[in-house]
Image: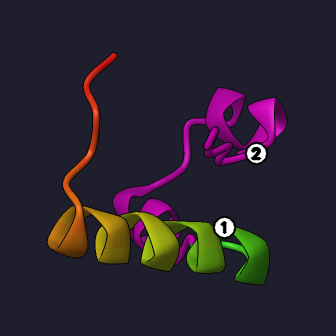
Amino acid sequence: MEVSLNIPEEFLAGLPTIEEVLRLRPSPQLQTQLEQLLEKQRTQGLDTY
């Protein structure tokens, strides 16, 4: 499963403040993927290849 953060380059190029970076939140789709990966890690373990 590939996970993509999709942070716009313009945001990073604009040298955001620490507060702006901390306000970033994953999209609902990314949040679901992360939850699935965490569950798989807990129950089956993850492959490293």
Looking at the image, is 21 positioned above or below residue 47? below
Residue 10 point in image, percent of width and height: 82, 35
Start and end of the magenta stretch? 1-24
The part of the image, by quadrant, that contains residue 7 is top right
Residue kind at label 2, given as amino acid type:
Asn
- Mark 1 or mark 2: name the one nearer the start of the chain: 2
**11 or 29: nearer the viewer:** 29
Residue 3 point in image, percent of width and height: 61, 45
- Residue drawn at (69%, 36%), measured in percent from left and top? 14
Q: Which mark is residue 19?
A: none
- Say which quadrant the C terminus sits in: top left
The part of the image, by quadrant, that contains residue 33 is bottom right
Question: Which residue carries the number 1 mark?
Answer: 30
Looking at the image, is 9 positioned above or below residue 16? above
- Residue drawn at (61%, 43%), measured in percent from left and top? 1
Residue kind at label 1, given as amino acid type:
Leu
Whether residue 29 sits left or right of residue 23 in the image: it is: right
- Residue drawn at (56%, 70%), measured in percent from left and top? 24
Foreground mark, 1 or 2? 1
SS assignment at label 1: helix
Question: Which residue carries the number 2 mark?
Answer: 6
The part of the image, by quadrant, that contains residue 22 is bottom left
Cβ–Cβ below 8 Å for labels 1 and 2? yes
- Residue drawn at (36%, 59%), measured in percent from left and top? 18
SS assignment at label 2: loop
**12 or 27: nearer the viewer:** 27
> Label 1 vs label 2: CA separation?
9 Å
